[in-house]
Image (cartoon, grey):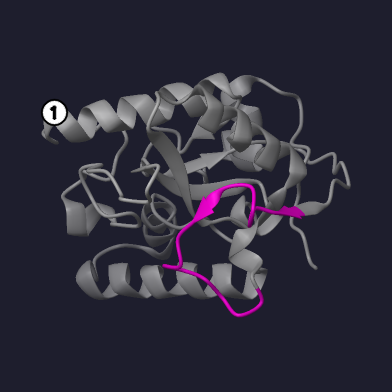
Amino acid sequence: MHDVVLISDPRVTSIPVEESGEPLGDARGRLRLSSLLADPEGAYAHLREGVLTRLEEAERLLPAGYALLMVEGYRPPVLQRRYFDKYSGELRAAFPEMSPEEVHVAASRYVSPIEVAPHTAGAAVDLTLCYEDGTELDMGTEINANPEQSDGACYTAAPGIGDEARHHRDILSAALTEAGLVNYPTEWWHWSFGDRYWAMATGAKAAIYGPHTP
């Protein structure tokens, strides 16, 4: 777990963005969507077209009977900042000995700082596996469980989760990786394409998606 590169790491934040200008596409009608984090404007259902087409490819790579269940895609910057500030506040309250820098790094395990957040670029998706009838599969934790709540079981490679959950995580990871997405290792459900973290993980010289304001 200690070799995980966090999204706040300079190896990620120093990567330039060469914005492609690619529009956001609507996943409704193309993928199964959960209503867990649905917003009235439907922002949650949107992703860059390059991400959406790769998710469609990943779903075709799944074993028969399985499907992707998308929970959240695009996240407006104001909401991203609210999430980061809220979790930072929880960490400060729980660990008052932490310095501001330590809180920032610790918070980035679970919520991306606004300046590099891939959700605000429409480059990241939170998703899980389900059967074709929409029944969600055991993945070891609930989606969006933080490291404290899950005792680290939210990490994609976490030891100690059940065999069934590990099998399901492996199925999800294999399909998404083959389709060209990369995982944020502290969150089994978080995958991205075209953002700075993707560029760091794949060796690309630049990200192709930066913050997007509708």
**Who's the residue at 85% across and 44% down the image?**
19
- Which residue occupies the extreme right position in the image? 21
Quadrant for the N terminus, please. top left
Which quadrant would residue 132 be assigned to in this image? top left
Residue at (63, 51) in percent of width and height: 116
The crowd level at tag 1 (other Cα within 10 Å; few <14, some 14-19, many 20+) is few
Q: Where is residue 194 in the image (x, y as percent from the top left)?
A: 70, 36
Which stretch appears magenta?
A: 25-41
> Which is the main secondary structure of the residues drawn in magenta?
loop
- Evaluate whether residue 14 shows in this view: no
Q: Which amino acid does label 1 sit on?
A: Asp
Q: What element carries label 1?
A: helix
Looking at the picture, how far across and down is residue 153, in whole percent? Answer: 21, 43
Residue at 25 percent of width and 76 percent of height? 93
Image spot of residue 165 (x, y percent): 21, 35
> Does the rendering let one see residue 71?
yes
Who is closer to the viewer here, 63 or 52?
A: 63
In the depicted structure, whether residue 153 falls above or below residue 79: above
Q: Taking 137 as reference, is 116 left or right?
A: right
Vertical placement of residue 87 versus 50, above or below: below
Does the segment drawn in magenta span residue 28? yes
Q: Residue 107 in magenta?
A: no
Identify the residue under disc 1. 163
| Residue 146, placed above or below residue 176 | below
Measuring from the top left, give residue 52's x and y in whole percent. Answer: 67, 42
Look at the picture and state if 70 lies above or below 161: below
Q: Quadrant of residue 58?
A: top right
